[in-house]
Amino acid sequence: MIRFDHRNLLSNPYLKTAIRPSRVLDYADKVYSAREELAKDRHSGTLGFYDLPEQDISHITEFVQKIDPQFQTMVVLGIGGSALGNKAIYNALKTEAELKRKVLVYDNVDPVFLHEILAEINLETTLFNVITKSGGTAETMSAYMILLDLLMRKFPQDYNKRMIITTDKEKGFLRKIADTGGYASFTVPGNVGGRFSVLSDVGLLSSAFAGVDIAAMLKGAADMRELCNNKDVLRNPAYLNGILHFLYMREGKNISVMMPYSNSLYDFADWYRQLWAESLGKRFDLKGREIFVGQTPVKALGTTDQHSQIQLYTEGPNDKVLTFLTVERFHHDYIIPDLHPELEDISYLAGKKLSELLNAERLGTEIALCKAERPNCNLIFPELNAYNLGAAIMMYEIQTVFTGKLLNINPLDQPGVETGKIATFALMGKKGYDKEREEISRFNKQ
């Protein structure tokens, strides 16, 4: 199981400005209230992601078993929560678990990006998975229409066997298409928001296709959920990390840096960025008061960004909380050979593993940050596997909604995103948006 090392957030001989345990305990009433509100939301069915570990996944495993062995690549068409989780799981495990099939994600409307994907794949051996709950996501639907047209022209007899639709169970344009067009289809749960949906069909189908043990991933999520039921906040990793970030936010540390010391976990940091930013970045609290709250998530990569960002983090504004992601055991490693024993500047590396150097550099960065009075913590993966990844996903999802309760905001909506969507509809000529088009026209003339 993954471990949350909070020492450099809560107490440390180097870090004199760390939050004291007594201060966390001072918020016992607020923690209790947040926990009770989450329990009510779970009971009402609002927080559907809590229940995903118990879902029946037989429809996914049976589909993958029956799939034509010719299909070796899946291209996911989605954006935001329909894309980032797929990328995070696949890229975390593709090498460590030696996955046999490939998953690519088209999550932007950049035409060159689409051209690159089409140039990389073999259409004969590729499945396309369209993921959008509403069926009206402009980015996803534009890709759907381009690629469906391509498939219909190249494979007129069986194009519908080369595309999968993942959408709302009952509503929307895509559900009608799936039900009448002969497409295999999967479901985006109605009570699970996009950024919390990675452990549903949204993320599990592509993972199972690639060869990920999705049952183990759900078991990790279930075990982490049980760990996060602990009423003692100091022994509950999601609640503890949540309240510490909340308290540091109150001290002006409004940037959250996630820095994996593993290339495989770099896309996990991307998934976290959406989860944390879209859930907590809110203008109004639950009483309608303007509060402009939130913590800006930033990703960095160790050791790469020791040579680009750490200077800022140690000597720049003290406005950040850093989270390291550490992998203890890698499935692939290399020993550095002793090619230049006469050169003291590099001979000390001889006989060491690359993983030793990587994790020594992480510890060195931790020490440097502590000496500079910069709060940091460490999420430790004993190894990268489906079980540990599922646990990490569940921990951060619980942490996010818990922190939203502490901030007295709704962590499940995203009203700031809708304004941009409406403007896009108007600019692209969608019916019913004449007023918005007029406003944009006046704006452009200024």
Image (cartoon, grey):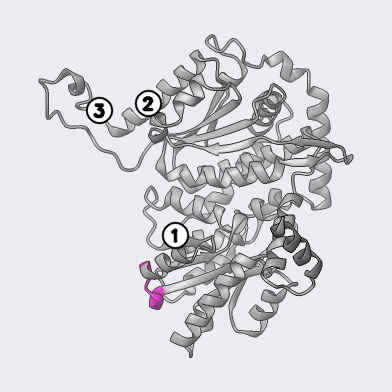
Alpha carbons under labels 2 and 1: distance apart: 32 Å
Q: Is residue 215 left or right of residue 226?
A: left
* Secondary structure type for disc 3: loop
Q: Earlier in the sequence, mark 3 or mark 1?
A: 1
Instruction: Identify the residue at the far front of this view.
Output: 446
Q: How would you rate the neighbour count of disc 2 (Cα within 10 Å): few for under 14, some for 14-19, many for 20 or more?
A: some
Q: How would you rate the neighbour count of disc 1 (Cα within 10 Å): few for under 14, some for 14-19, many for 20 or more?
A: some
* Secondary structure type for disc 2: helix
Q: Which residue is mark 1?
A: 211
Which mark, by number, is residue 426?
none
Instruction: Identify the residue at the far right of this view.
Output: 287
Which of the two discs, 3 and 1, sits closer to the camera? 3
Camera-nearest residue between 375 and 442: 442
Which of the two discs, 2 and 3, sits closer to the camera? 2
Tell me if residue 189 can be seen: no
Q: Which portion, as a residue range, is magenta?
A: 120-125
Which amino acid is tagged 1?
Answer: Gly
Q: Is residue 220 left or right of residue 441?
A: left
Q: Which residue is mark 2?
A: 361
Q: Which residue is mark 3?
A: 352
* Residue 79 point in image, percent of width and height: 59, 59
Report the residue at 55% width, 26% height from top: 377
Residue 137 lies, with reference to residue 14, above or below; the image says: below
Alpha carbons under labels 3 and 1: distance apart: 32 Å
* Residue 130 point in image, percent of width and height: 57, 69
Which amino acid is tagged 3?
Answer: Lys
Alpha carbons under labels 2 and 3: distance apart: 13 Å
Residue 67 lies, with reference to residue 152, above or below; the image says: above
Do callouts 3 and 1 mark residues in contact (Cβ within 8 Å)? no
Residue 33 lies, with reference to residue 164, above or below; the image says: above
The quadrant in which residue 279 appears is top right
Magenta-span inclusion, residue 169: no
